[in-house]
Image (cartoon, helix red, strand yellow):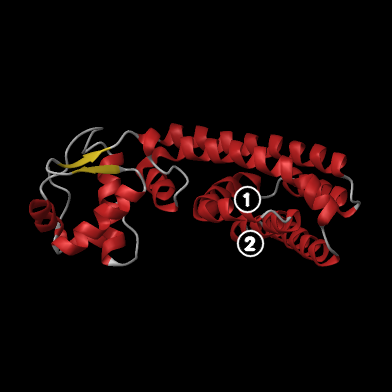
Amino acid sequence: MVMGTPTALGALPGVRAGSLTDRVEQRLIAAIIARQFDVDDRLPQESELAEELGVSRLTLREAVKSLQRLGVVRIERGRGTFVNPRSRWSQLDPLILTAMIDAGQGAGVYRSLTELRRMLEVGLVPLAAERRTEEHLAALGDALHRMQHACDAHDVGAFAAADLDFHDVLLDAADNPIVLALYGLMNDALRRIREQTTTRTIGDPAAVDTHRRVFEAVQAGDPLASVDAMSRHFDNTARYVAQVIDADQDDG
């Protein structure tokens, strides 16, 4: 099994910038996702794999330990390192999420994360309506203003950034540190989803209007209206995500 030229490790598909250990982790998980190794397959011997990747055995060992912590592999003493089924992986870990997107499996990630966001944010927005401060309202208004300006200018990057800021403020207003930590794990994948869906939403008045209705309900301190507005917003979001998935499948 040839995993690539050792000296070109950082340039391989699915491998991003980072420390050497980070890049080895990315390369190994990319190979596993690409089914170069199947479930319950044993990885090559440490010395063989380290030589193939052009890294020290210590670097490889650290990378494998990290993948073990993520549930991607298991180490059986005296037998070697084996690939685990995906049901045992830490599915929300940023490394795994981005690796799956890079491997062309973004459709499943996009759909699953959007469904998770809907469950969380529809549940949290009434808390935001009850707990928001004047600072939160000012920040929401600013994000909404930037969103409208970006929509008018057809500026995809600015719209995506304002969209992220809007939802981040709502999460902060809801004041639930566990959910904030959960979103922290998903940030990179969510940013990439926003970039993809914004190419569909840009110029669509509904993209701004649904956010404005959420803002107005939160501003009014109305939990029930905020739930209704957020539900309608995610109806719209699900439509955009479906368009992105369909386009990716057509390109494939």
State whether residue 215 appears in this view.
Answer: no
The residue type indicated by label 1 comes to: Val
| Disc 1 target residue | 179
Q: Quadrant of residue 58?
A: bottom left
Residue 136 is left or right of residue 62, and the answer is: right
Left of 252 or right of it: where is 213? right
> 242 or 59, which is in the foreground?
59
Circle 2 Cα neighbour tier, 10 Å, few/some/many (<14 / 14–19 / ≥20): some
Residue 144 is situated, as x and y percent measured from the top left of the image, at 77, 58
Q: Percent x, y for residue 238?
A: 63, 35
Q: Is residue 35 above or below residue 220?
A: above
Q: Residue drawn at (76%, 41%), measured in percent from left and top? A: 230
* Farthest right residue in view: 220
Of tags 1 and 2, the one toward the viewer is 1
Vertical position of residue 64 compared to residue 80: above or below: below
Q: Which mark is on residue 217?
A: none
Q: Which residue is mark 2?
A: 158
Is 247 drawn above or below residue 143 in the view shown?
Answer: above
Question: Dot 1: what SS?
Answer: helix
Q: Residues within 10 Å of mark 1 (few under 14, many from 20)?
A: some
The relative height of residue 189 versus residue 248 in the rendered view (above or below) is below
Q: How many marks?
A: 2
In the structure shown, which secondary structural element does the residue marked by tag 2 occupy?
helix
Seen from the viewer's position, the closer of residues 4 and 122 is 122
Q: Is residue 121 left or right of residue 46?
A: right
- Quadrant that contains the C terminus: top left
**Disc with the residue nearer the chain's start (1 vs 2):** 2
- The N terminus appears in which quarter of the rendering? top left
From the top left corner, tell me how far across and down residue 118 is, in percent. 66, 39
Which residue: 58% across, 48% down? 199
Residue 229 x/y as whole percent: 80, 41
